[in-house]
């Protein structure tokens, strides 16, 4: 069957199942909110779906009482409270989507498989042109054997596959399967529900990056898989602002008592401006003036931490990690030493880094030049980040 509407006119919903407690992983919070590769595990899947051009809505099924953790992990997003079992959580999500107007297609994904590529999503959506369901799968490579405590006979692995998520379906078909499923009978795989009612499920090529995170050792393995897709980049940033009477002096996100302050279109925090440009340089995304032009009145007097966090969010969206930030402030006054710790802590907080990932130094120009005459402050920054090779892991299938 061919779709009656153009592909870009389809309503494609993504439903991320994240209602579990993740007890096998250990820790004090459910595994879907644990940090993995620099951000909460669930945020990786949200990013993958949000950046895909065909996905029109993203929903998350969470456990009761997890609303605050979800908001902290990914910000505003459509969510629904799941059930005791995975099947109940998926059913709740599908019903919520239906109540909100429905969809043509739906991709049902486990939050514990964080590194989802657009390549897999594309293949699944394409497969739904001919089949009502589709799953990503990898052939079984290991030898399989029966046995309890001692090794028994081997099991032929020909024709055996490891099924992953997301699993993709024509929305009406999978919703009908859930509604018709016998009460009290559980199932952990949505594709098998479709097959129960005589519908076909296609298989597309899976991805080794989609291995499920279940046990503590899986975190380290997932981190290693992600790290293998990254290369290191460094870039510098430089900024200067004039010192004037009557202005507040903001440096490194900290308000510093002084008889003069820095003048500029925003709060003129020369330190955060230099770091922002360094981070943007690592991504090849222009400079601070490109994203926050001084000609735009909305940025008049704006807090510079907004610029810094915007630059950091670009790196996160690309699947990158900030490793280190080094800042040098150049001025005769004020003395930076008494404020160094506070600035370091604030910059680390803004970038979600440990304090030992932030370095702050200060120097003078021996009374030479505009900084030596006390007319302004200059800042130079260097940032080191790791970014996916060429394109993001979401875009390139890594």
Image (cartoon, grey):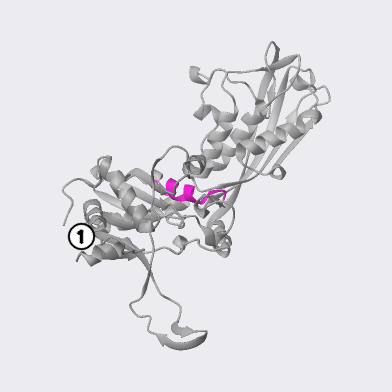
Residue positioned 56% across, 22% down in the render:
302
Residue positioned 70% across, 42% down in the render:
355
Q: In which quarter of the image is residue 260?
A: top right
Please tell me whether residue 314 is drawn above or below residue 217 in the rendered image: above
Q: Quadrant of residue 50?
A: top left
Element at badge 1? Answer: loop
Residue positioned 53% across, 59% down in the render:
23
Q: Where is residue 118 in the image (x, y as percent from the top left)?
A: 38, 53
Between 163 and 10, the one lying in front of the other is 163
Please tell me whether residue 381 is drawn above or below residue 356 in the rendered image: above
Given the current orientation, which residue lies at the most extreme front position? 184
Split into 4 quadrants, where in the image is the N terminus? bottom left
Between 392 and 221, the one lying in front of the other is 221
Q: Can residue 391 be seen in this view?
A: no
Count of numbered labels shown in the rendering: 1
> Could you tell me what secondary structure mostly forms the magenta stretch?
helix
Please tell me whether residue 120 is drawn above or below residue 377 in the rendered image: below
| Residue position marked by numbered label 1 in the rendering | 130
Residue positioned 35% across, 76% down in the render:
160
Given the current orientation, which residue lies at the most extreme right position? 366
Given the current orientation, which residue lies at the most extreme top position? 246
Q: Position of residue 303 (x, y in %)?
A: 59, 24
Question: What is the span of residues highlighted in magenta in the rendered image?
Answer: 38-49
**In the image, 358: left or right of 313?**
right
Q: Does the segment drawn in magenta span residue 46?
A: yes
Q: Where is residue 214 in the image (x, y as percent from the top left)?
A: 50, 62
**In the image, 63: left or right of 37?**
left
């Amino acid at each position: 069957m061919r779709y009656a509407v153009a592909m870009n006119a389809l309503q494609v919903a993504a439903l991320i199942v994240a209602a579990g407690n993740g007890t096998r992983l250990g820790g004090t919070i459910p595994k879907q909110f644990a940090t993995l590769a620099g951000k909460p595990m669930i945020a990786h899947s949200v990013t993958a779906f949000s950046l895909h051009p065909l996905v029109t809505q993203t929903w998350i099924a969470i456990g009761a009482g997890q609303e605050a953790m979800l908001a902290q992990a990914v910000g505003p997003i459509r969510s629904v409270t799941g059930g005791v079992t995975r099947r109940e959580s998926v059913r709740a999500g599908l019903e919520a989507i239906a109540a909100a107007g429905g969809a043509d297609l739906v991709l049902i994904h486990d939050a514990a498989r964080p590194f989802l590529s657009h390549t897999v999503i594309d293949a699944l959506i394409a497969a739904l042109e001919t089949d009502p369901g589709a799953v990503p799968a990898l052939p079984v490579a290991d030898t399989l054997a029966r046995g309890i405590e001692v090794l028994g006979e081997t099991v032929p692995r020909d024709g055996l596959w490891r099924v992953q998520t997301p699993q993709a379906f024509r929305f009406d078909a999978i919703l009908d399967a859930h509604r018709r499923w016998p009460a009290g009978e559980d199932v952990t795989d949505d594709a098998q529900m479709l097959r129960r009612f005589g519908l076909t499920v296609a298989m597309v090529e899976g991805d080794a990056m989609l291995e499920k995170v279940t046990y503590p050792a899986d975190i380290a393995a997932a981190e290693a898989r992600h790290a293998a897709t990254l290369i290191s980049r460094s870039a510098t940033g430089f900024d200067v602002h004039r010192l004037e009477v009557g202005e507040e002096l903001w440096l490194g996100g900290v308000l510093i008592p002084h008889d003069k302050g820095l003048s500029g279109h925003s709060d003129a925090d020369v330190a955060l401006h230099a770091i922002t440009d360094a981070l943007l340089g690592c991504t090849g995304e222009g400079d601070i003036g490109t994203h926050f032009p001084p000609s735009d009145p909305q940025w008049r007097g704006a807090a510079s931490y907004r610029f810094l966090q915007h630059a950091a969010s670009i790196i996160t969206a690309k699947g990158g990690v900030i490793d280190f930030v080094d800042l040098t402030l150049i001025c005769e006054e004020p003395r930076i030493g008494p404020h160094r710790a506070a600035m370091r802590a604030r910059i680390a907080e803004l970038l979600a880094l440990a304090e030992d990932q932030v370095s702050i130094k200060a120097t003078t120009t021996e009374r030479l030049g505009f900084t030596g005459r006390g007319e302004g402050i200059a800042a130079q920054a260097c940032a080191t980040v790791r970014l996916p090779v060429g394109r993001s892991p979401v875009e390139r299938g890594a």
